[in-house]
Image (spheres, grey):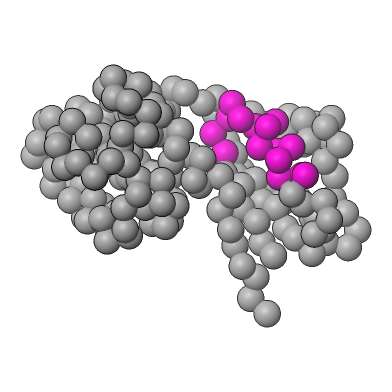
């Protein structure tokens, strides 16, 4: 049986990038998901989508859900990115501003040993009969935790809280 992989942090990451974009450009929170095609909203929306898709590797679905678009819009943004970035300074500057602000918003340096100590300190340990696998990608390495159905929700919530100030991805395999 093939295991299903679920990106737990993907939607939250897209929301975080959206919040950075709206703060940078003095837009109302949530305005990137409005239906308007005015450049004031459209260009930051495209930049957010492309940062999430191209640089964070987030699937089309969570990006589309947060931006209240269909997947084809996200495909379109991704397809236009290279040409717009190379030829249009307005888009390039917006993209770079959002990307740099996002990059600076999270701590990226942590060692595997530090992470394992942090997890142990909050009581997160492997179970003996795992049914759920939690993989944490952080600082260029990954840690795989073994969990079961009874404990995995609490474990994931604890991990998210523990790592809220770090650039990380959490994947669940069931």
Q: Decide whether residue 133 is among the magenta residues.
A: no
Locate residue 7 relative to residue 63 in the image: left or right: right
Q: Is residue 152 above or below residue 29?
A: below
Residue 109 is at least partly visible in this image: no
Q: Position of residue 135 (x, y in %)?
A: 66, 51
The residue depicted at 49 percent of the width and 45 percent of the height is 11
Locate residue 11 relative to residue 65 in the image: left or right: right
Locate residue 50 relative to residue 58 in the image: left or right: left
The quarter of the displayed image where residue 24 is located: top left
The residue depicted at 61 percent of the width and 30 percent of the height is 164
Q: Tell me the magenta residue range.
A: 154-168
Q: Is residue 60 above or below residue 24?
A: below
The residue depicted at 9 percent of the width and 36 percent of the height is 88
Quadrant of the drawing holding the N terminus = bottom right
Q: What kind of secondary structure does the magenta stretch mostly adopt?
A: helix
Quadrant of the drawing holding the C terminus = bottom right
Residue lying at the far left of the rendered structure: 87
Front one among 159 and 72: 72
Locate residue 32 relative to residue 2 in the image: left or right: left
Q: Position of residue 74 (x, y in %)?
A: 29, 54
Q: Decide whether residue 159 is among the magenta residues.
A: yes
Residue 36 is at least partly visible in this image: yes
Q: Is residue 58 above or below residue 2?
A: above
């Amino acid at each position: 049986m093939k295991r299903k992989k679920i990106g737990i942090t993907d939607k939250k990451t897209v929301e975080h990038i959206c919040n950075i974009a709206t703060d940078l450009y003095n837009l109302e929170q949530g305005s990137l998901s409005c239906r308007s095609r005015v450049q004031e909203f459209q260009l930051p929306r495209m930049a957010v989508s492309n940062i999430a898709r191209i640089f964070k590797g987030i699937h089309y679905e969570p990006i589309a859900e947060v931006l209240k678009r269909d997947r084809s819009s996200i495909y379109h943004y991704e397809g236009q990115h290279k040409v717009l970035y190379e030829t249009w300074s307005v888009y390039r500057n917006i993209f770079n501003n959002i990307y740099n602000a996002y990059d600076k918003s999270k701590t990226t340096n942590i060692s595997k040993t530090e992470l394992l100590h942090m997890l142990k300190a909050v009581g997160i340990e492997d179970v003996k009969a795992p049914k759920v696998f939690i993989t944490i990608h952080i600082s260029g390495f990954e840690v795989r935790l073994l969990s079961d159905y009874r404990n995995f929700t609490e474990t994931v919530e604890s991990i998210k809280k523990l790592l809220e100030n770090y650039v990380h991805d959490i994947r669940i395999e069931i």
